[in-house]
């Protein structure tokens, strides 16, 4: 089990590093390509990739279950969250957008308590409150360092948190492949709608952005496989905290690729968000151990 946990943790770190690189490529592409067109490209590439993977695994995808209200609502939440996060990536600092998105587990815990009837003690309530203070330190509304575009990252965090909550209401036979294909297919009309709303035309990517598109699709698929392998290999309580390694890779990319210099308040806020999230995960795993279903 110890070796499985080590392997699972390494796969989770690999997945987070790859997702950070994919985010970097999306931000770089957004300098030439509209957000709507990015959604269309990634949606088509991701959907085709996961359909091919499901076919290789002989997994039936197109079933009536796809019309289950929880799956449709989950897809809508993922679309909203992705719009927020990709918009934040394109318009604000890479480090800031990546730091705010780390608040998703805290929002999930809050939502589970308010809407799903999950028991949350005062310690986790305190961790949630402290974590949101960390978010405020990162975006600093009303102060000189405030970037309005950072609010898109907050929209992304809330959308992705709702997605994770609705995952709990999905039919038990729904797999990660079902979730992924639905989301990527939904990205295509979403992208068309964003292009129409913004008056953006189709752009023929140059050679560099064509390479970025191909890399983003391939890296996204490999990251997906890595995160699934991580959760199936190691104990969830051991592997899950390594999701926060994504912010480490994001800070490195922000510094060395985009020349960002996060100030002390942003770093303190990030540490608070990550610390609160890790504490919440620890309390949840302890509660599950004390009160198994």
Image (cartoon, helix red, strand yellow):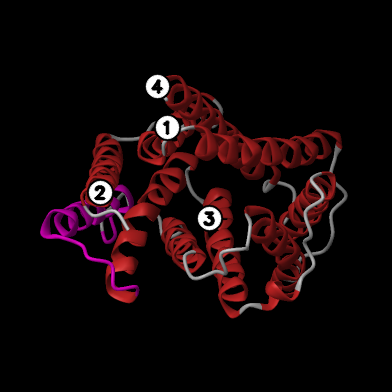
- Please identify, in this view, whether the residue under mark 3 or under mark 2 is nearer the observer: 2
Name the residue at 80% across, 67% down: 62
- Between 120 and 35, the residue placed more toward the observer is 120
Residue 245 bears which disc, if any? 1
39 on left or right of 20: right
Q: Give the crowd class for mark 2: few <14, some 14-19, many >=20 residues within 10 Å.
A: many
User: Looking at the picture, how far across and down is residue 55, in whole percent?
Assistant: 84, 50
Q: CA distance from mark 2 to mark 4?
A: 23 Å
Q: Earlier in the sequence, mark 3 or mark 2?
A: 3
**Mark 4–mark 1 contact, CB under 8 Å?**
no
Mark 1: give few (<14), some (14-19) or many (20+) Cα within 10 Å: some
Label 4 element class: helix
Residue tagged by mark 2? Answer: 280
Earlier-in-chain disc, 3 versus 1: 3
Q: CA distance from mark 2 to mark 1?
A: 16 Å
- Disc assigned to residue 2: 4
């Amino acid at each position: 089990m110890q070796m499985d946990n080590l392997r699972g943790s390494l796969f989770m770190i690999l997945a987070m590093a790859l997702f950070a690189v994919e985010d970097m490529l999306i931000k770089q592409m957004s300098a030439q390509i509209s957000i709507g067109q990015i959604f269309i490209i990634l949606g088509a590439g991701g959907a085709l990739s996961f359909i091919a993977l499901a076919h290789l695994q002989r997994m039936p995808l197109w079933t009536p279950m796809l019309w289950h209200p929880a799956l449709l609502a989950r897809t809508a939440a993922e679309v909203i969250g992705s719009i927020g996060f990709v918009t934040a990536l394109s318009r604000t600092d890479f480090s800031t957008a990546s730091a705010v998105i780390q608040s998703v587990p805290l929002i999930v815990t809050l939502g589970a308590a308010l809407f799903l009837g999950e028991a949350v003690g005062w310690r986790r309530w305190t961790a949630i409150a402290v974590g949101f203070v960390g978010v405020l330190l990162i975006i600093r509304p009303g102060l000189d360092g405030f970037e309005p575009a950072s609010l898109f990252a907050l929209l992304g965090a809330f959308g992705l948190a709702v997605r994770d909550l609705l995952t709990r209401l999905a039919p038990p036979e729904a797999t990660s492949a079902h979730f992924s294909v639905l989301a990527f297919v939904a990205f295509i009309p979403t992208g068309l709608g964003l292009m129409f709303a913004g008056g953006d035309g189709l752009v023929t990517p140059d050679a560099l952005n064509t390479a970025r598109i191909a890399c983003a699709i391939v890296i996204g698929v490999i990251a997906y496989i890595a995160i699934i392998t991580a959760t199936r290999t190691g104990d969830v309580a051991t592997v899950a905290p390594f999701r926060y390694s994504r912010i480490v890779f994001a800070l490195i990319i922000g510094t060395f690729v985009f020349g960002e210099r996060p100030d002390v308040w942003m770093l303190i806020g990030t540490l608070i968000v990550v610390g609160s999230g890790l504490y919440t995960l620890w309390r949840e795993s302890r509660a599950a151990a004390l009160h198994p279903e």
